[in-house]
Image (tube, rainbow, N blue to C red):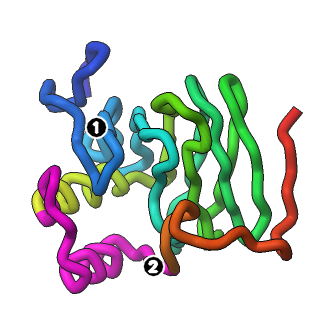
Amino acid sequence: MPAFVVRAGLTRAGAAPIFVVGDEVSVKVSSRDTDNAFAVLEGRTQPQQGPPLHLHHHQDEWFYILEGRYLFEVDGVQIHAGPGDTVFAPRGSRHTFQNVGSTPGRSVITVVPGGLDLFFEEVRVAAPPGCAPDPAVLSALFKKYDMELLGPPLAARPPDETTETHLIP
């Protein structure tokens, strides 16, 4: 594979970012580039938004926060993170996050091994911007990529007093 550059605001394919159920994802290094060894994504999360609680059976996920204030939940532990902070969700962990700030948040996400970028490409087709995904189709995609959808996003859940909160220094 020859060296390449992905310009700001574009994806690896040179296209606009992928809108995935309310989030904007730019693929910077595709699984296709690394023989599925890893993928690197840039995520932009709107205020009070984030993905549902989920689990990757075979992928570690590493987040580096560029902008915004986030609340992560990894295996029931709540972690507050902001610019310059790193959060790691190992394979098999139940995790989600929410941009708890009032402005869009931005992060770099690395997934090992790759495949999450391919999942997002398929979700984009199944649920174009402005359309709610068909739960059966979404469930099938989670299964195809060896992930599980476990619950709603943090914004849709009542605060849980039993979770442990950690502030990252």
Residue at the outermost bottom position: 136
Please name whichever residue, 144 or 32, is drawn nearer the observer in this view of the structure: 144
- Chain part drawn in magenta: 126-150
- The amino acid marked with disc number 1 is Asp
Total numbered badges shown on the rendered structure:
2
- Name the kind of residue labelled 2 in the image: Glu
Q: Residues within 10 Å of mark 1 (few under 14, many from 20)?
A: some
The residue tagged with tag 2: helix, strand or loop?
strand
Seen in the picture, residue 143 relative to 29 is either above or below; the reply is below
Residue 102: % across, % down: 54, 33
Please give the label number shown on residue 33.
1
Residue 83: which quarter of the image?
Answer: top right
Task: Please provide percent x and percent y for residue 2.
Answer: 25, 21
Residue 121 drawn above or below residue 70? below
The residue singled out by tag 2 in the image is: 148
- The residue shown at (23%, 29%) is 11
The magenta stretch spans residue 12: no
